[in-house]
């Protein structure tokens, strides 16, 4: 009888453990599902977004209680016509774009279009001003102005005077004094230097209604230069919160000021409280693909 009782007790204990593990697993799954999902859409010929964005994504998961998915051009970053997995945007709480001159098929543009029209927030980096490059007369030619209707940038490279000040130049960044108290700038130094060459977007962009946060001054420009905004917030044509920066060279991301700006902007677009405690500088060592 004692043997039977022992076996019965062990069975009950095992059942209890398995049941408890099942509850814990379900609770963990439910807790994970409550974390915002940030989807990165990458693909460029020059700045290594397929390598820099996963590092940002890992930081968001490790230290800021978020879930992330990083989508990449396939079979390699130079491939302009295929970014698999864009349907995940249906579940995204925030979409972050770092693209350059893609020509995606209509079925891959559709999830992006639906996401934008949902009014959900977006963030964009540097060459996303010219994310798409469809030929004149193409059915998707209007996507060449993606930067304009999603982020308030010029509607493509070379449009409205959109250019830069030469690959040999770099940029001094300063916070606009009137924006020092802006939550996105929490912990961001008032000035720092980045490797990227300044993008010219003035006088028509950022558009009316945008809030410029930081200015850039070209150092060693190849032509007469003026200061230009390098980071701003806006509302998309469908009302979604939008943050854009013309920074994005892989060496730019070594600057702690830019790292802090990006993490803050992610929280701002998601309507989450800006982190008061900084988790620390992010290790970045991504090479630049010389053009």
Image (tube, helix red, strand yellow):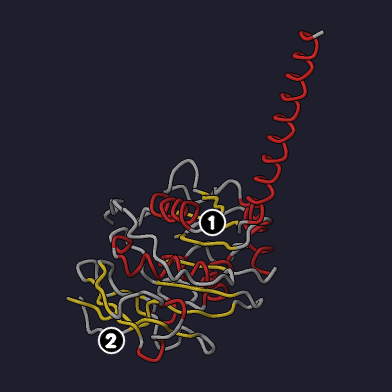
Q: Residue visible at 39% across and 91% down? A: 178
Mark positioned earlier in the residue sequence (1 or 2): 1
Residue nearest the viewer, comparing 207 with 185:
185
The location of residue 65, given as percent across then percent down, is 54, 56
Question: Residue at 74% of width from left, 33% of height from top?
Answer: 19
Left/right placement of residue 252 relative to residue 240 reads left
Cα distance between the residues tagged 1 and 2: 40 Å
> Can residue 111 be seen at all in this image of the molecule?
yes
Q: Within the image, what quadrant is residue 256 found in?
A: bottom left
Instruction: Give the residue displayed 46% in from the left and 47% down from the top.
Output: 79
Question: In which quarter of the view is residue 202 placed?
Answer: bottom left
Residue 214 or residue 151, whichever sits in front: 214
Residue 211 falls left or right of residue 288: right
Task: Specify the farthest residue to the bottom.
Answer: 178
Mark 1: secondary structure: loop
Q: Looking at the picture, does residue 160 appear above or below residue 19?
A: below
Which class describes the residues within 10 Å of circle 1: few (<14), some (14-19), or many (20+)? few
Residue extending furthest toward the left: 220
| x then y, percent, for residue 139 | 63, 62
Task: Identify the residue at the far front of this view.
Answer: 2
Image marks 1 and 2: residues in contact by CB distance under 8 Å:
no
Quadrant of the rendering where the C terminus is positioned = bottom left
Q: Mark 1 points at which residue?
A: 65
Give neighbour class at mark 2: few <14, some 14-19, many 20+ (Cα, 10 Å).
Answer: few
Q: Mark 2 points at which residue?
A: 226
Indicate the secondary structure of the residue bearing disc 2: loop
Residue mark closest to the camera, 1 vs 2? 1
Which residue is nearer to you in this view: 260 or 130? 260
What is the x, y in percent for residue 289? Answer: 30, 52
């Amino acid at each position: 009888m004692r043997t039977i009782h022992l076996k019965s007790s062990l069975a009950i204990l095992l059942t209890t453990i398995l049941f408890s593990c099942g509850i814990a697993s379900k609770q963990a799954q439910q807790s994970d599902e409550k974390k915002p999902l940030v989807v990165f859409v990458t693909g460029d010929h020059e700045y290594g977004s397929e390598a820099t964005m996963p590092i940002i994504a890992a930081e968001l998961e490790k230290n800021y209680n978020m879930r992330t998915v990083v989508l990449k051009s396939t079979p390699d970053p130079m491939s302009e016509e295929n970014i698999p997995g864009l349907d995940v945007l249906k579940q995204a709480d925030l979409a972050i774009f770092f693209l350059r001159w893609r020509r995606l098929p209509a079925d891959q543009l559709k999830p992006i279009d639906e996401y934008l029209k949902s009014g959900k927030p977006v963030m964009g980096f540097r060459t996303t001003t010219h994310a798409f490059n469809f030929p004149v007369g193409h059915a998707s030619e209007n996507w060449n102005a993606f930067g304009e209707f999603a982020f308030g940038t010029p509607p493509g490279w070379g449009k409205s005077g959109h250019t830069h000040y030469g690959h040999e130049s770099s940029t001094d960044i300063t916070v606009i004094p009137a924006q020092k108290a802006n939550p996105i700038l929490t912990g961001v130094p008032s000035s720092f230097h980045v490797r990227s060459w300044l993008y010219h977007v003035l006088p028509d962009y950022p558009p009316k209604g945008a809030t410029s946060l930081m200015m850039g001054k070209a150092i060693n420009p190849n032509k007469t230069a003026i200061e230009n905004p390098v980071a701003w917030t806006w509302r998309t044509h469908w009302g979604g919160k939008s943050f854009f920066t013309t920074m994005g060279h892989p060496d730019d991301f070594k600057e702690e000021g830019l790292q802090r700006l990006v993490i803050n902007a992610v929280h701002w677009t998601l309507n989450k409280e800006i982190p008061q405690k900084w988790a620390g500088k992010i290790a970045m060592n991504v090479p630049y693909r010389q053009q």
